[in-house]
Image (cartoon, grey):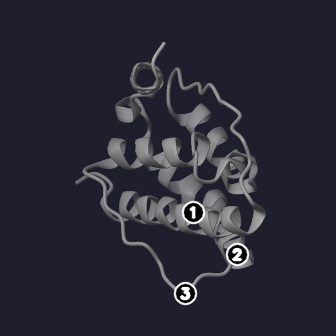
């Protein structure tokens, strides 16, 4: 099978496996974010250093959660994020407040440690931005 055909099939499978967050209890997720996820995310970002913060946007609450989920648990840039404390609390929050939520994780090859640390911070910065957007625009 050709490379591009394999990539197309993998992307198609990823689209099929994406959870639809529209049935989630956004208010309860927001409370979990403020009380549980944010402190862990803040701690993680403080232990990795960077000069800039990425500005991100999402269209609505479901889109924010979709991007958070994809970049936290299916990252090719920073595969170790899914094992961080903020990721584990995110997964537990989704499982509690989103009916039928499940996630299949695919282990990916690790890259050089220094590059991974920088990439992880950038990716986590985006994830935090989506959480902030979700938090500010809940119900709009």
Q: Nearest the camera: 44 or 26?
A: 44
User: Is there a contact, CB below 8 Å, between mark 3 and mark 2?
Assistant: no
Q: Quadrant of residue 101?
A: top right
Question: Which badge, 2 or 1, comes first in the chain's sequence?
Answer: 2
Q: Is residue 79 left or right of residue 136?
A: right
**Residue name at image x 67 percent, y 66 percent:** 115
Number of numbered labels in the structure image: 3
Q: Nearest the camera: 48 or 41?
A: 48
**Residue name at image x 53 percent, y 55 percent:** 31
The spot of residue 138 in percent (x, y) is 33, 55
Quarter of the image containing the C terminus? bottom left
Q: Quadrant of residue 37?
A: bottom right
Q: CA distance from mark 3 to mark 2?
A: 10 Å
User: Is there a contact, CB below 8 Å, between mark 3 and mark 1?
Assistant: no
Identify the disc placed on residue 124: 1
**Residue name at image x 35 percent, y 41 percent:** 62
The spot of residue 89 in percent (x, y) is 68, 48
Q: Which residue is mark 3?
A: 51
Identify the disc placed on residue 84: none
């Amino acid at each position: 099978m050709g490379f591009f055909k394999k990539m197309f099939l993998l992307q198609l499978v990823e689209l099929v496996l994406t959870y639809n967050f529209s049935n989630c209890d956004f208010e309860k997720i927001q409370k979990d974010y403020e009380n549980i996820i944010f402190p862990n995310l803040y701690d993680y970002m403080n232990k990795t250093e960077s000069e800039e913060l990425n500005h991100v946007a999402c269209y609505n609450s479901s889109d924010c959660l979709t991007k958070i989920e994809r970049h936290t648990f299916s990252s090719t840039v920073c595969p170790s994020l899914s094992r961080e404390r903020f990721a584990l609390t995110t997964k537990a929050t989704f499982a509690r407040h989103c009916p039928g939520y499940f996630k299949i994780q695919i282990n990916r090859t690790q890259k050089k440690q220094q590059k991974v640390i920088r990439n992880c911070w950038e990716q986590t910065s985006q994830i935090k931005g989506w959480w902030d957007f979700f938090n500010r625009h809940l119900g709009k």
